[in-house]
Image (cartoon, rainbow, N blue to C red):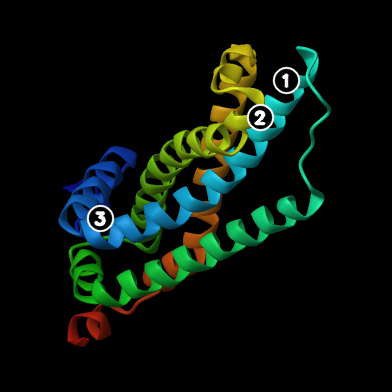
Amino acid sequence: MAEHGSPGRVSFGLGDALRLGYDYIKKRRDRALINISSIALGIAFLSTLLFTDSFYRAFIAAGGAHLSIESYQYWLMFVALIVSVVGITNAVLIAVYERYREIGTLKCIGAMDRHILLLFLVESLIQGGIGGILGFFLGIIGALISTGGTTGFDIILKVPATEILILFLGSTFLSIFLSVIATIYPARHAAKLNPVEALRYEL
């Protein structure tokens, strides 16, 4: 953060948030890995079902037997995504408590509530993006393993590239969206902290 304008005010843009967020993720890899893994598993389940459906449709179009996904599997996918969101929220809440002093220091040097909020949301965006990409490719592998014996492992070559691209973009966007949504409550809690009380806090 750099001084800007009147005394006691600071400028804190998206670039600053990205730099600090990336530094925190590197510094606390274990905590970040929990969030990334949580969202990646939910997205992997989703991608597996979506790709399985795509493989079945490509198989039927090629003259194969009629295959379809059971409806209960989509309910399981929904539950998996909810669990991912809850897991991320809990992990970020713990991270907020661990960073009380850091948040207090930032506020003492001029950071405003919106700066703290932006910092946490950017961190969640980075982790959500990584988790979404990882989950997408895990989903492809899962779908191939579960359907390959019936449709053949080359079935992915029969799925249009545009459909794969749409699934990739959709999965990544959903991952980022869920990660940000899960972070809003803990981030607002962090943003509202009293800097003096935060500096006094001990784990």
What amino acid does circle 2 point to?
Answer: Thr
Q: Quadrant of the C terminus?
A: bottom left
Q: Tag on residue 150?
A: 2
Q: Tag on residue 9?
A: 3
Q: List x then y, in percent, for residue 90.
A: 44, 72
Within-10-Å neighbours for mark 2: few <14, some 14–19, many 20+: some
Within-10-Å neighbours for mark 1: few <14, some 14–19, many 20+: many
Q: Quadrant of residue 196?
A: bottom left
Answer with left or right where residue 23 lies relative to residue 15: left
Circles 1 and 2: CB atoms closer than 8 Å: yes
Answer with left or right where residue 81 lies relative to residue 23: right
Circles 1 and 3: CB atoms closer than 8 Å: no
Q: List x then y, in percent, for residue 127.
A: 37, 48
Front position in the image: 125 or 106 = 125
Q: List x then y, in percent, for residue 62.
A: 75, 12
Per the model, the C-alpha gap separating discs 1 and 3 is 62 Å
Return the residue at label 1: 59
Mark 1 and mark 3 lie on one chain; the one further toward the N terminus is 3
